[in-house]
Amino acid sequence: MSAIPVVSEVPIDTDHRPTPVSSAPIPEAARPPLALWVEGLSVTFDGFKALTDITLTLEKGELRCLIGPNGAGKTTLMDCITGKTRPTEGAVYLENRLTDLTKLSECRIAQLGIGRKFQRPTVFQGHTVYENCELALKGNKGVFHTLFARLKPADRTRIDEILELIGLKDHAKRQAGLLAHGQKQWLEIGMLLAQSPTVLLIDEPIAGMTHAETERTAELLRGLAGAHTVVVVEHDMEFVRSIARRVTVLHQGKVLAEGPMAQIQKDPRVVEVYLGE
Amino acid sequence: MERLRQMQSPRAWMMLGAAALIIGVFVPLVAPEYMVPLLGKFLCFGIAALAMDLVWGYAGILSLGHALFFALGGYGMGMYLMRVMAGEGVYRSNLPDFMVFLDWKRLPWYWHGFQSFPFAMVMSLAAPGLLALVFGYFMFRSRIRGVYLSIVTQALTYAATLFFFQNAAGFGGNNGLTDFKRILGASLHDPGTRKALYVASAIALFGTYLVCRFVVTSRLGRVVTAVRDAELKSRFCGYESTHFKLFIWTLSAMLCALAGALYVPQVGIINPSEMQPSNSIEMAIWVAVGGRGTLGGAVLGAWLVNGGKSWLTAALPSAWLYVLGALFVSVTLFLPDGLVGLGAKLTARIRSKLGTRADSPGSGPQTDSKPGPTTTPILSTPVGGVPPIHPAPPPS
C-alpha cells in the first residue's frame, strides 16, 4: 500500500479561545490550539438524560477515540456537534470562532468545516462514485451557484486524488448504490475528505470491513490526523488500540475517563463498565 | 458546447430537433382544423408532465397540488381574456358577465391590470409561483415528505377548489371563466389564431424541456436527487436541502402554470373542476406510465394516456376510470420505470442476445442523468419513493 498523502493543510491560526460560559478549567496556554470545544453539554429526551454535562476539548490535529458501552451517548454527542440534535444545555465551539455550533443548522456546521461519517455507510445511491465526490467537494453550496457550477480543473485533480486514495478510481463511473459494503464505507470517507473539514467525526468506520480493509483504514486515519482533527467512535478495541493516542470513555451520558490508551486500560472504573465485559 | 453535450447525447439532440420540426412545423401544416386545439391541449399536458416529472422523478416529491398551479395559470389567462372583451359580453357591460349577473358594481381590486396581456402573463406565472414558494417554505421547513406531503398538497388543492367554487371569490364560481372572444386582437375562433396558439404551445413545450434538461443535468440537479436519496447526508455535505427542494418545487409550479395559461385559450374555459385533486393524480399517472425521471418519458406518458382517454371516453365512456385505475396499478406493479424503462430493458436484452456489447448511450461522465436507484419500486418508503395513492376517485 502506498503511503497516505496529507490531503490538505489546515492553517494553524493563532489561538483565540472562546471564553467558557462556566468556570470549567481552562487548558494551559502552552498546549496546542483547540479544534473543538464542547462545554457542559446536556441532552434530555423526554426525561431521559442521554448526555449529562459533557465537557471535552480536542486539540488541533489530534486523533481521539470515543468509546463506551451501548447507550453511553457517543452517537448523541456526534449528533449534537453536527447539529442533528439540539442540546438541552451547553455549547460547542469550533477553533477560534466564537459561534456556538449548537445554534446552527446541519448544513451551516458542515460548511464551517465539520465532516461526519455515519454508522451505516450513507452515500448517494443514484449517483456515480465521481458525482458523489463532486457533491461533497468543498465550495459554494448555494442553490443558484450550483445551478451554473462547473468543475474546475483543480476540482477534477482533487477528485482524482481522492479516488486514488480510497482505491475507487476504476469505479468512478459506477453507481454508488452498486458498490460493495466496504467500498461504500471508503467512498463515504472519500466524500468526507472532499469536504476538507477541519474536524472529522467518524462513526464506526470499520463495521463490515475485512481485515485488510481495516488495516488500510487504520493507516488512513493515522495519516489524516495532524492535518485534520479526527474523532473516531469504535467498538472494536483492537482497532482502537491500533490508532488511538488519547481515548475518551463515555458511560451513561457522562465522561468516565480520559487519557492515553495505556492508562485507560488500567483504569478500574473503565475495566468494570467496558473493557472487562 | 460541452454543457450541451452534458445535457444530452448528440443523438438525443438530433431526435429532439426532429421532434420539434414534426410537432412544431409539420403537424400544424397537415392537421385537420378541428384537431388543432386538441393537439394543442396535448402539448400543454406535455408541459405539465415535464413539471410533474421534475418535482416527482428527480426530487421525489409526489405533489398532488399541481392541478392547482395549472388551473391558477389558466385563471390568469382567463382573466385577461375576460377583461380584453369588456363591453362585448352578453350584458354589454364593462364588467365580466358573471359579475353583472351577481349585481356587482365595481371590479374587485385583484382584477385590475388584467386587461394588459404582459401583466396577465406575469401574474399567471408569479401568483402560482408565489403560492408554491410560501406553501413550500412551510412544508419543507417542517420536513414534511412522502405520503404526508402528498396529503398536504392534495388538501391545499381541495381547499382552493372549494374557494374558487364560491361566487363571492370573484372568479366566476362554478362556471368559471368562459365565452372568450379574442386574444391579442385576434379572434379565438379563427383557425389561424388556433394554429398560432398551437405553435406557441409547441415552443413552450420544447423550451420547458430544455429548461428541465438544463436543471437536471446541472450540479443543482444532482444535489436535488441526492436530497431525494439521502437528505440527511446532503445536509451534512453542506447543502441546505430545504432551499433546493423549494427551488425545484417553485420552478415546477411555474412551469405547470405556463401549461395552464396556454391551455385555457385553446379549450375556451377555465373552471374549478380543473383544479380537482383527481387531476393532479392523473398528472402523476402520466409520469408513472412514461417513466419517472426521464423528462421525455413524462411527455410520452401524458400523450399516451390522454390519447387513450380521448379515444375511450368517446368509444366506451363508462370504462375510462377503470382503465385509468388499472393502468396505474399495473404500471406500479410491473413497470416501476415506466415505458421508457421498459424500452431500455428491451433494447439491452436484444443487444445482449445479438452478442453486441451494450454500450452506454452517453459520452461524458455526467451525461448519464438516469435517476436514482433504478430498483426503487413505485410503492416504496416515503423517502425518495412514492407513497401508495389510490387512483383517481370518481368525479363528484
Image (cartoon, rainbow, N blue to C red):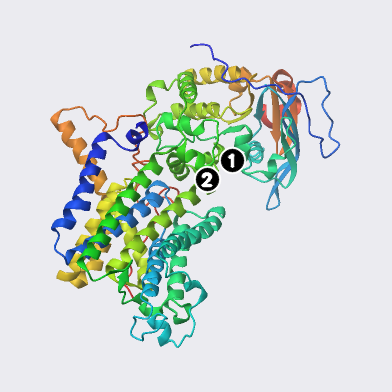
Amino acid type at mark 2:
Ser
Q: Position of residue A26 (x, y in %)?
A: 83, 29
Give the left or right position of residue A194, taking residue B394 as reference: right
The subunit letter for the residue under badge 1 reads A
Give the left or right position of residue A170, taking residue A247 as reference: left
Nearest to the observer: residue B173 or residue A131: B173
The subunit letter for the residue under badge 2 reads B
Q: Quadrant of the N terminus of chain B?
A: top left
Neighbor class of circle 2 (other Cα within 10 Å; few <14, some 14-19, many 20+) is: many
- The residue carrying mark 1 is A107
Nearest to the observer: residue B120 or residue B147: B120
Nearest to the observer: residue B357 or residue A247: B357
- The residue carrying mark 2 is B241
Q: Which mark is residue A142?
A: none
* Label 2 close to label 1 by CB (< 8 Å): yes
- Is residue B184 depicted above or below B228 in this figure? below
Residue name at image x 45 percent, y 88 percent: B103
